[in-house]
Amino acid sequence: TSPDYKLDVAGTVGVDDYIYHNGDTDTYMNFTTDAWKVVVGDQTALYTAEADTNHAKVGINTTSPQGYSDTFTVKMTQSASGWPIGFVNSDDSVKGALRTDSGDNYIALATKTESDIRFFYNDAEANTALIIKGSGATAGNVGIGTTAPAAKLDVLSTTEQLRLSYDGSNYVSSLCSF
């Protein structure tokens, strides 16, 4: 068969150093021992490196991934705050993000629409453990054990609902029953 491109390889290709974008010397891929870097406009866009024999590190806008897990790091390049990690569903109707802000020193999980923020387990919304309502009359309400919190804090449980503890062995416990 004839090649589809000027260079068409059916098999393995070895690269020792750089692959450049034609006519654009500051956009390239760089291969080194146990590392790979994508540079766009002379800025490192993506960097991967072997952390040890079982793990790799991934950095976006950084060549030295660091952080809580030391596996995935996104470094803000424009300012000290922003929305570096975004989540969008297939039709762009629900948008969420993780945000950092060095001035106020916080990390936020937020939605860009009036969507709820849910924490659930076993990959099923029916197993919602915590919900923060995002719109309507219940906006800002927090539910534990319920997906429809009717108050600022709504805890639904047939067992102990509240425990205030000093050191684990000294506590006050409450169960609301009628």
Image: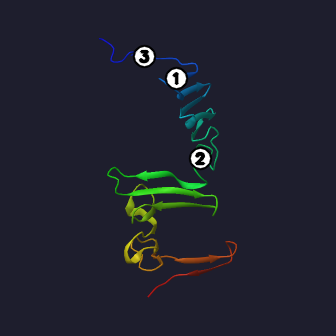
> Which comes sooner in the sequence, label 2 or label 3?
3
Kind of residue at disc 2: Lys
**Image x and y of residue 124, in percent:** 39, 58
Residue annotated with mark 1: 19
Which quarter of the picture shows residue 47?
top right
Query: In the displayed structure, would residue 115 be above or below residue 75?
Result: below
Residue annotated with mark 2: 75
Kind of residue at disc 1: Ile
Looking at the rendered structure, the secondary structure element under dot 3 is loop
Real-space CA distance between mark 2 and mark 3, rounded to the nearest whole angstrom = 36 Å
Q: Nearer the viewer, mark 2 or mark 3?
A: 2
Pick the residue in front: 79 or 164.
Answer: 79
Q: Nearer the viewer, mark 1 or mark 3?
A: 1
Kind of residue at disc 3: Gly
Quarter of the figure with the N terminus: top left
Real-space CA distance between mark 1 and mark 3, rounded to the nearest whole angstrom = 18 Å
Pick the residue in front: 20 or 55.
Answer: 20
* Residue depicted at 39% across the width and 73% down the height: 148
Total numbered circles: 3
**Residue contact between numbered discs 1 and 3, judged by CB atoms under 8 Å:** no
> Which comes sooner in the sequence, label 1 or label 3?
3
Residue annotated with mark 3: 11
**Image x and y of residue 127, in percent:** 41, 62
**Image x and y of residue 3, in percent:** 33, 14
